[in-house]
Image: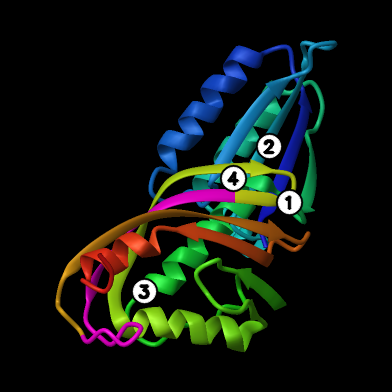
Amino acid sequence: MTFVQIIDCKTSRVDDLNRLMDRWVEQTKGKRTATHSIVGKDRSDASHVVEIVEFPSYDVAMQNSQLPETDRIFREMVALCDEMPTFTDLDVVRDEQMYKATSRRLLELISTSGELPPLDEVLAEGYRDHDPNSPSEAHGMDAVRREIEMWRGAFDFDFTVEDQLADGDRVCTRWTWKGTHVGDFMGIQPTGMELSATGMVVHRFREDGKAVEGWWQYDLLGVMEKLGAVE
């Protein structure tokens, strides 16, 4: 679960504090485990400064806090502050950007070669897929895995994410698919052809960041034409 730490301090030396943050980033380059950092100044109180730092997890954040550079910078930060900074530790339970990452992660899991890994890190139990090219909806983890295995058995492929848009609990991902036809696909014997298609998927997420529903649109007709199955 993503972890966020909020550092709250009062200082009349904001510029010095910013320079200190720059030095911290430079000194911990290659070792710092934070993935995102924002420093904000209170519009109603110029001496009130808040830093929001994001980490992949609490354990990873603790690794960062144990760096000798972090300890040294913290002591210098305390010296710049009018009073002792306060720390608030938060486990993130909802984040639209996280939803985007989960959609990308699902495409990555689907297309990675080798044995299909567990999908429960990204999909909720009871997940439902809507695919207009499929005669029936895939409902539940087992049904989804069967659909994915059908594609993986027919093609060596990967996805390139072109665009993503998030709105509330939904993420739309536009992608390009490229694959090599290496196995039976809808009765068509392997041709070795290299194919490509475009499409998109809208995923709906629940608060723990797992997808509960997906709606797919893609150019299956174009793929079938290239394979010579339709004119």
Colour convention of the picture: rainbow
Q: Amino acid at mark 2?
A: Ile
| Numbered circle sitting on residue 112 | 3
Considering the numbered disc 1 on the image, is that residue within a helix, a strand or a loop?
loop
Where residue 156 appears, as percent x and y from the top left, is 27, 75
Say which residue appears at 43% left-offset and 66% top-offset. Answer: 108
On the image, which quarter does residue 165 sit in?
top right
User: Would residue 98 be visible to someone looking at this image?
Assistant: no
In this rendered view, identify the residue nearer to me: 79 or 108: 108
User: Would residue 35 be visible to someone looking at this image?
Assistant: yes
Question: Which residues lie in the magenta part?
Answer: 172-189
* Looking at the image, residue 96 lies above or below residue 152: above
Say which residue appears at 50% left-offset and 69% top-offset. Answer: 133
Considering the numbered disc 3 on the image, is that residue within a helix, a strand or a loop?
loop
Where residue 150 appears, as percent x and y from the top left, is 41, 84
Using the numbered discs, state the Cα–Cα distance from disc 2 to disc 4 in whole angstroms: 18 Å
Q: Nearer the viewer, mark 4 or mark 1?
A: 1
Residue at the right extreme?
Answer: 44
* Looking at the image, residue 6 lies above or below residue 153: above
Q: Amino acid at mark 4?
A: Asp
In this rendered view, identify the residue nearer to me: 134 or 156: 134
Say which residue appears at 73% left-offset and 37% top-offset. Answer: 7
Q: Amino acid at mark 1?
A: Asp
Q: Quadrant of the N terminus?
A: bottom right
- According to the picture, the residue beneath numbered tag 1 turns out to be 169
- According to the picture, the residue beneath numbered tag 4 turns out to be 71
Where residue 28 appears, as percent x and y from the top left, is 44, 43
Using the numbered discs, state the Cα–Cα distance from disc 3 to disc 1 in whole angstroms: 26 Å
